[in-house]
Image: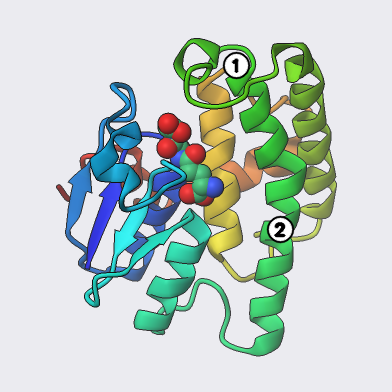
Amino acid sequence: MKLYQSIGPNPRVVTMFIAEKAMDVPRQFIDILTAENRQPDFLAKNPAGGVPVLETDGGHFVAESLAICEYLEECQAASPLIGETPEARAETRATMRTIDQSVIVPMTNGFRGSEGLPMFESRMACFPDAAPGNKAQAQDGLAKLDAALADKAFMCGSRFTLADILLFCFVEFGAQVGQPLPDTLSNLKAWQARVAARPSAAISADPKNGL
Ligand SMILES: N[C@@H](CCC(=O)N[C@@H](CS)C(=O)NCC(=O)O)C(=O)O
């Protein structure tokens, strides 16, 4: 197995997941700032060009951070981060879908249409006019997740799951690119501090850790 990783929140989701599961996965760093991921060599592994990508022992390339985590969970069931039962897995997946649609998609579209425009405009369609609306939509999504956290330690109750890893990596990314958590979202702030205290948060903060 080999993980192709880079800076950025999506690779961090996978490296934090691997750290939580204490798995040993060899890695190769891809420089997205110089568009190494948009060169033929990398596009042969993932035609969409996004990092991370996992190369399996059987020589298959798995793209999409959540699909990679699902694959790794199947390889190592111990310390489950998606769920031990069908019901628990369904809850984690439903929560991740909500996080994806209500926060991550608008946040990243907002970034690519504004602060990230110089890096992304030659790589994909970017929509500067929509960026303020995208960012407002992400903030609205965060406010709804804050309300849902009122009586829970983690996104799926008392279970720490991949849904927490996913949201945490993008909350931290948002803070770096001009979309910080508002102080008024106190449930999310307390949750962020709980997740940040886990060793996997520090390990995954440096994309070259483990390389
Ligand atoms: N949906 C993909 C997104 C992958 C993605 O956009 N990765 C970013 C890094 S966080 C990237 O490769 N950016 C550089 C580029 O798109 O050229 C996933 O979950 O893995």
**Looking at numbered disc 2 in the image, what kind of residue is underneath it?**
Arg
Identify the mark at residue 97; answer none if there is no mark: 2
Compared across the picture, whether 91 is left or right of 56 comes to: right
Please state the horizontal and vertical placement of residue 124, each as a whole percent of the image: 55, 27
- On screen, 122 above or below 67? above
**Residue 60 visible in the shown view:** yes
For residue 35, which quarter of the picture?
top left
Compared across the picture, whether 15 is left or right of 84 comes to: left
Q: Residue at x 76, y 38 (%)?
A: 142
Indicate if the residue with disc 2 has its beta carbon within 8 Å of ligand 1. no
Q: Residue at x 32, y 53 (%)?
A: 45
| Pick the front one: 119 or 153 | 119
| Pick the front one: 181 or 97 | 97
**Outermost residue, bottom direction?**
85
CA gap between label 1 and label 2 equals: 24 Å
Q: Mark 1: few, some, or many residues within 10 Å (few <14, many ≥20)? A: few
**Looking at numbered disc 1 in the image, what kind of residue is underneath it?**
Gly
| Pick the front one: 119 or 38 | 38
Please state the horizontal and vertical placement of residue 209, each as a whole percent of the image: 21, 44
Question: Which part of the image, by quadrant, shows the N terminus?
Answer: bottom left
The residue to which callout 1 is attached is 178
For residue 188, which quarter of the picture?
top right
Compared across the picture, whether 210 is left or right of 184 comes to: left
- On screen, 208 above or below 56? above
Helix, strand or loop status at disc 1: loop
Q: Residue at x 56, y 12 (%)?
A: 115
Task: Give the mark toward the camera: 1 or 2.
Answer: 2
